Amino acid sequence: MKRIRLHVQTFSHRPALYRITPERWAAAAARHAELAARLDVTFDDEAGLGTAEIALGVPADRNRLADRAPRLRWLHHAMAGVDALLPFDWLPSSIVLTNNRGAHGAKAQEYMRMAYTALNLGLTRMIANQQARRWEQIFSPRLAGQTAVVVGLGDLGMAAVRAAGELGLKVIGVRRHARPCDGTERTVTFDAIDSVLPAADYVVLATPLTPETRGLLNAARLRLMKPTAGVINIARAAVADYDALVAALREGRLAGAVLDVASPEPLPADAPLWSAPNVLLTPHISCDDAADYVEVSLELWFANLARYVAHEPLAAVVDRSLGY
Amino acid sequence: MKRIRLHVQTFSHRPALYRITPERWAAAAARHAELAARLDVTFDDEAGLGTAEIALGVPADRNRLADRAPRLRWLHHAMAGVDALLPFDWLPSSIVLTNNRGAHGAKAQEYMRMAYTALNLGLTRMIANQQARRWEQIFSPRLAGQTAVVVGLGDLGMAAVRAAGELGLKVIGVRRHARPCDGTERTVTFDAIDSVLPAADYVVLATPLTPETRGLLNAARLRLMKPTAGVINIARAAVADYDALVAALREGRLAGAVLDVASPEPLPADAPLWSAPNVLLTPHISCDDAADYVEVSLELWFANLARYVAHEPLAAVVDRSLGY
């Protein structure tokens, strides 16, 4: 059997849950002993990249990658969003790029349960009241029967759809194409989003950031939403116009927002978003499980490795023209 | 058919969702026209109470009630907790007291979804960081597989059990007797609570406040909990020792608390609870639906009226010796 040179980025500079430590790698390899036995693995060093057929983790420095990794055929991005890698001018056409889609849904679903219920309860107003030491009873109706518009129906979007279903919400999907989607009453394309925003009690942004989705929820579209509605963003900040969003919240044209993403990240202390009214800001933690993010990610990767050695099409391949 | 004199308290001084307005009464009566046709209804005035056979709503002034309402046979408390009516020395033994249990579960279930997910995410720390304009990624594991100890398995407790089940939590129940309960792995009695607190990731207080439950979650018992655990209280503040709870939070012996009840209510601005670390304080809104609280309550009441006229035992009868 032909041996395979694999180069692994350990991400030692990233938060602990993302690090592909030797222990985590060994545990995953032990679960896939037959496949792992074919691998010659190097970690982190440039020389290893130079002879690698497969790389797990995109190098931070992608300058002249084609020259530095001349044998590379499969490059795996160990995160879901590839927007930080755009444009793909550094990526030779001979290399297949995959991402980590599929590793985020279970955790995202739990975050979405929090986001829907918190917005419905008016939790952001209660948090402000708690800070002001003000007892003011704010009552809310039930979530069941309300409507969520979920923008993007991939790994994260489907988590938002499942959470909505559990809570009895009706769901309208918005995505690139209008094919029917399980868990939604109907699905419209991005360019028809204006027709569904007025129905939304919650607009959930869960789409990759691409040229098509950048600025999608803009000032004009925010004006189509009900003043009782809320925005939830587990995608990328730039999918919405945050300045317009904050203005809408300040003017009472929107009830609240639960935002897990900001721009830039980390958000500087002087950013107005920190103190925008009725914003609950979480620090990009909605979709990554502290207990087993790498474990789940490596399971997906080994499943793809099995396809690779069997000469089957890889899963989670990034479409260069679509940007996700 | 014998006509029935009914006296209704409209609760015009309470928040709007609790008011039994003429419109809401008429709508409920129209849904139960045959029963309603037998009623001679008065609203609020003392003279009406004086001739009433049934009263919907306990008068704020219960002094000499037996003399003021000599014909009263059935008194309905339009709320769940009767702790504010204790002791029952004002209540003649000839009068059956019922409460509004059953009207709170659906809303409480939604609140509990928020409470479990917020505590698991470490939301209280993120809220503090947002106030401090500090970007600090706090990652969390999934809720699924964690353990909730639910104290009290009535209307509210079962809502906590259902929400836990949806989220994949294991549930241990605690109540007056140890009979098995759907949705729980096991159930222990109040006096065995020490044996289950060490297993809890979440302790949910959902029991009526009675002599048996007052101070149940005391300082010694809080010390039995894991430092990663959280407390959720949708019952009454006095079921826990809040001073001890705040001390445990300040000393890092507990991760967080979601509290919907305080003492007194409204909580005065100088109460230390407002600024206790890792407390999310909501103003007693967890279980009452803004859209249809009275509607649901009147449905339950008319169902009981049907039992009354049929000489069947009433539902939701308060046990005077148990205090709920």
Image (cartoon, coloured by chain):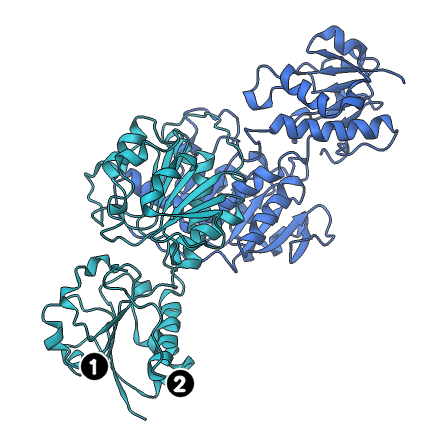
Chain colours: A blue, B cyan
**Chain that bears disc 1:** B
Residue sitting at the far right: A1
Residue sitting at the far bottom: B1
Cα gap from disc 2 to disc 1, whole angstroms? 20 Å
Q: Is residue B10 left or right of residue B25?
A: left
Residue that badge 2 annotates? B33
Of B119 and A128, the residue lying toward us = B119
Residue that badge 1 annotates? B52
Of B214 and B243, the residue lying toward us = B214
Q: Which mark is residue A273?
A: none
Q: Residue at x 60, y 49 (%)?
A: A162
In which quarter of the view is residue A156 placed? Answer: top right
Under tag 2, what secondary structure? helix
Q: Residue at x 54, y 40 (%)?
A: B144
In which quarter of the view is residue A35 placed? Answer: top right
**Chain that bears disc 2:** B
A47 shown above or below A313:
above
Report the amino acid beneath label 2. Answer: Ala
Under tag 1, what secondary structure? loop
Image coordinates of residue B120 in percent, x first then y, are 46, 36
Of A138 and A27, the residue lying toward us = A27
How many badges with numbers are in the image? 2
A75 shown above or below B144:
above
Camera-near label (2 vs 1) is 1
First along the sequence among labels 2 and 1: 2
Image coordinates of residue B108 in percent, x first then y, are 41, 54
Q: Residue at x 39, y 31 (%)?
A: B226
Image coordinates of residue A220 in percent, x first then y, are 55, 48
Residue B277 in view in this figure = yes
